[in-house]
Amino acid sequence: MKKTLFKTSIVMLIALITMSCSKDGATGPAGPAGANGTNGTNGNANVIGTNSFTTTSSNWTSGGGGVFWTANLTGATSITQNIVDKGIVSVFRMYTVNGATQWSPLPDTNINQNLSFSYGVGTISFLMQSTNATAIANPGAITLRYVVISPSNKRAHPNTNWNNYEEVKEVLHLQD
């Protein structure tokens, strides 16, 4: 008797659960469409283009009896460990030729001097050195610009010459 009562209870419980589960009512009408949002300007969150900056004679420290000079740019917070490991930092030197601005990539050799750079997290170091082992004057004012390119932008533009300022400017929509 107990087994029959137990089985009957189970069957009734299953029937109750099955009948209790039914589809909801019919779907109501669609609501009105929302207003369109304002379109923003297309941008690229993976590129940090800096404004140009100019070194001064006080930025440079002499070494090797004046055969080389070094300067450090600190506070370059856009240069993260991810950029150091997988991204690119390009640096360009500004020249004015016949009244027109031109940007030359580093390293840059001019007469008997070579200007190069290296970078790490938050910093860029510049090295101006003599190409013929003779002492050179303090480099003084040099106008430079650096561009930080994320790994995703590097992958998205695999054929970009990252040492060509005009190409970098066009591909990454940089403003002068």
Image (cartoon, rainbow, N blue to C red):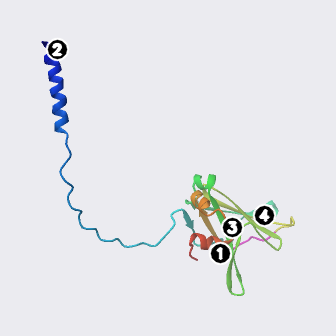
Which label is found at residue 68?
A: 4
Q: Which residue is drawn at 15% across and 32% down?
A: 16
Mark 2 = which residue? 3
Specify the segment rendered in magenta: 136-141
Q: Within the image, what quadrant is residue 91 found in?
A: bottom right
Residue 124 picture location, percent across and down: 65, 61
Q: Within the image, what quadrant is residue 36 found in?
A: bottom left
Tag 4 secondary structure: strand
Mark 3 = which residue? 161
| 76 up-or-down from 8: above or below | below
- As for residue 147 lying within the magenta part, the answer is no
For the residue marked with disc 3, what is the amino acid?
Answer: Asn
Residues at discs 4 and 1 in contact (Cβ within 8 Å): no
Q: Which of marks 2 and 3 is in front?
A: 2
For the residue marked with disc 4, what is the amino acid?
Answer: Phe
Q: Which of marks 3 and 4 is in front?
A: 3
For the residue marked with disc 2, what is the amino acid?
Answer: Lys
Tell me if mark 3 has few (under 14), some (14-19) or many (20+) residues whose alpha carbon lies within 10 angstroms of its own: few
Residue 65 picture location, percent across and down: 81, 62
Task: Point out the tag, 2 or 3, that comes first from the N-terminus.
Answer: 2
Q: Which of 147 and 86 is in front in this view?
A: 86
Left or right: residue 76 versus residue 33 is right
For the residue marked with disc 1, what is the amino acid?
Answer: Glu
Mark 1 = which residue? 166
On-image quarter of the N terminus:
top left
Task: Point out the tag, 4 or 1, that comes first from the N-terminus.
Answer: 4
Residue 93 picture location, percent across and down: 69, 72
Label 4, label 1: how far apart the Cα atoms are: 30 Å
Label 2, label 3: how far apart the Cα atoms are: 83 Å
